[in-house]
Structures are given as C-alpha cells and as structure tokens.
Amino acid sequence: MRTLILKSASSYLLPVLLLFSVFILLRGHYLPGGGFVGGLVAAIAFVLDAFSNGLDKTKVVLKVHPGFLMPLGLLIAFLSGITPILFSDLPLMTGLWADDPIPVIGALGSALFFDLGVYLVVIGASLTIIFTISESA
C-alpha cells in the first residue's frame, strides 16, 4: 500500500512524530508520559515510514540496527538506577536532581536518564519485532 498520498504524508510526519516523541519523553518526569509512551510514538513513526517507503529505506533512515538500542537503553537505565549508590549513601533508584534547571528541559535528574533508557529499549524492541515480522512476510 504505497500510495502517493501516504508517501508524501510520511515524509512530513516522520520528523513531526519524532519531535513529539521527544516532547513526551521530556514531559514524562513531571507529568504523565515518559520513556515508554515516547518510545512507542517514535516506533510508530518509523513503522509508518516503513509502510510508505519500504523497509530498506527506513533502515537507512534509522542508521542503527534496532537491536543495538535495547542493550544501550538497558545500560543507561541501569546506570541511572545505581548512580545514588555510587556517588552518595542513598538507596538504589533514588532520584538525584541538578541544582540549576536547563531552560528547555527543566530540572535535570536521574529520572530523565532512566526514562531515556526505557525510551531506547521500547524503540529497539518494537522495531525489532515489527521489522522481523515484515521481513518474513
């Protein structure tokens, strides 16, 4: 189903959906949202691109294998969880926050890095499953 309308729309929707997924990721450590929902929105953006332009072109746009994103995300989430143990006497998974907020992001803390790890794991797992199913069909 590669229509002209779908190809045209997906070329505009991919960057918009990826930007929206980053917005949901950054919004998540204050309000509902975060890594899981943002990762799903990003995965949907790449799936839409694969439906309209083909799987090979989407893999070129993605630039990394989705299976690489899963261990990278797990490493980031794990490091954000053990950071309180390494740098202070606080328990595991205690939120650490920077003193000065960043203008666009807000207060930078370990919760954001944990959400970033979840974000990458969800994108990697979702795209690995969907790309594997698409290649076998």
Image (tube, rainbow, N blue to C red):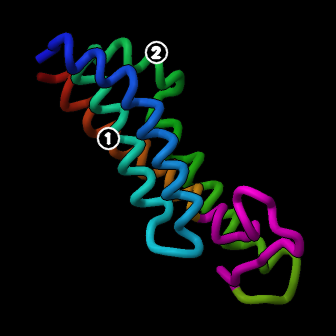
The x, y position of residue 88, in whole percent, is 87, 83
Few, some or many C-alpha atoms within 10 Å of disc 1 (few <14, some 14-19, many ≥20)? some
Look at 20% across and 11% down and name the residue there. 4
Q: Residue at x 25, y 30 (%)?
A: 132
- Residue 95, image x and y in percent? 70, 80
Amino acid type of the residue tagged 1 in the rendering: Ile
> Is 24 left or right of 104, judged from the image as shown?
left
Q: Magenta region: which residues?
A: 92-114
**Number of on-image labels:** 2
Residue 103 on the magenta span:
yes
Name the residue located 38 percent from the left edge and 20 percent from the top edge. 11
Compared across the picture, whether 13 is left or right of 54 comes to right
Q: For the C terminus, give its image quadrant.
A: top left
Q: Quadrant of residue 85?
A: bottom right
Instruction: Please tell me whether mark 1 sits on a helix, a strand or a loop.
Output: helix
Q: Main secondary structure of the magenta part?
A: loop
Residue in the picture at 78% in, 59% down: 103
Relative vertical location of residue 92 with respect to residue 98 in this rendering, above or below: below
Can you tell which mark lies on residue 44?
1
Of the residues tagged 2 and 1, which is closer to the observer? Answer: 1
Residue 60: which disc?
2
